[in-house]
Image (spheres, helix red, strand yellow):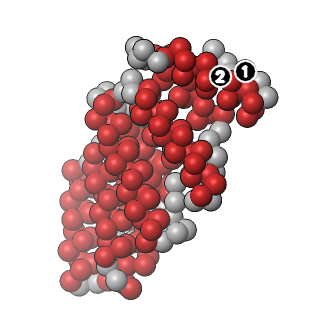
Amino acid sequence: MEMLETTVEHMRNVGNSLNSAARLDAIKYGTIITALAKNGQVDKAHDMLLEMSSVYQNGGEKSRDTKPDIKCFHLVMSAWTRQSDAVFAAMKAKELLDHLWSLNSYNQSIKPNTAIYNATLNCFKNAKQAQNAHTLLEDMKEFAGKRRMQAPDVTSYRIVLEAWHRSNDAAKLLMIRTLTNEYKKRFGTRPPN
């Protein structure tokens, strides 16, 4: 991985001063982010994704080829779900989700989908933050109409239900009952245990 970092730094230097064809574009960024995320370096993948987004937003006309791919966001968020420090991972996943919405205000074709939200919900579940997961589910339902985003799916509900099952919150039983009833109305069946 050290060699990858050296190569990235070299590409930045060459791309900025000598040969614009060597400049990091969306494909190169995506390849680097994938390599970092799949090799357990999610912090570095996260930072690289934020760098890519910043170059895209602030780099002017020559940076249009650095438009972040939603797959990169999903890859990094999914990598956060596998981290041992679940509370930190949940915070970082939420940070990426918020950043994605800020990119949406810059370019409306870039927006979170259900898979992105489900990865964030998983991070909250792993961090035993059932209330945060529930709030995010409510946001998904609200945004589905207003922002032309996909509605929560079966997986979204299952993750939040599991988060409540793991919770020690006093509202646990009420929230499970409420979500179970909503799940039945929405999907026509009871959620699995």
Distance from disc 1 to disc 2, alpha carbons, whole Å, reads: 7 Å
Q: Which residue is mark 2?
A: 180
Quadrant of the image occupied by residue 100: bottom left
Q: Which mark is residue 190?
A: 1
Q: Are marks 1 and 2 in contact (CB under 8 Å)?
A: yes
Rendering coords of residue 177 (x, y %): 61, 18
Q: Earlier in the sequence, mark 1 or mark 2?
A: 2
Q: Which percent across, then down, holds residue 157?
A: 60, 31
Check disc 1 and give the amino acid type: Arg
Which residue is at a point 34% across and 49% down the rendered structure image?
95
Foreground residue among 53 and 8: 53
- Position of residue 110 measured from the top left corner of the image (x, y, whole percent): 51, 64
For label 1, count other residues whose C-alpha is less than 10 Å away and answer few (under 14), some (14-19) or many (20+).
few
On screen, residue 188 versus residue 113, left or right, reads right
> Vertically, is 93 above or below 26?
above
Q: Residue at x 38, y 43 (%)?
A: 93
127 lies left or right of 193: left
Q: Residue at x 32, y 72 (%)?
A: 55
Q: Is residue 149 above or below residue 94?
A: below
- Dividing the picture into quadrants, the one containing residue 101 is bottom left
Name the residue rendered at 42%, 34% in the picture.
132
Task: Name the one closer to the observer, 9 or 127.
Answer: 127
Task: Name the foreground residue: 57 vs 160.
Answer: 160
Q: Amino acid at mark 2?
A: Thr
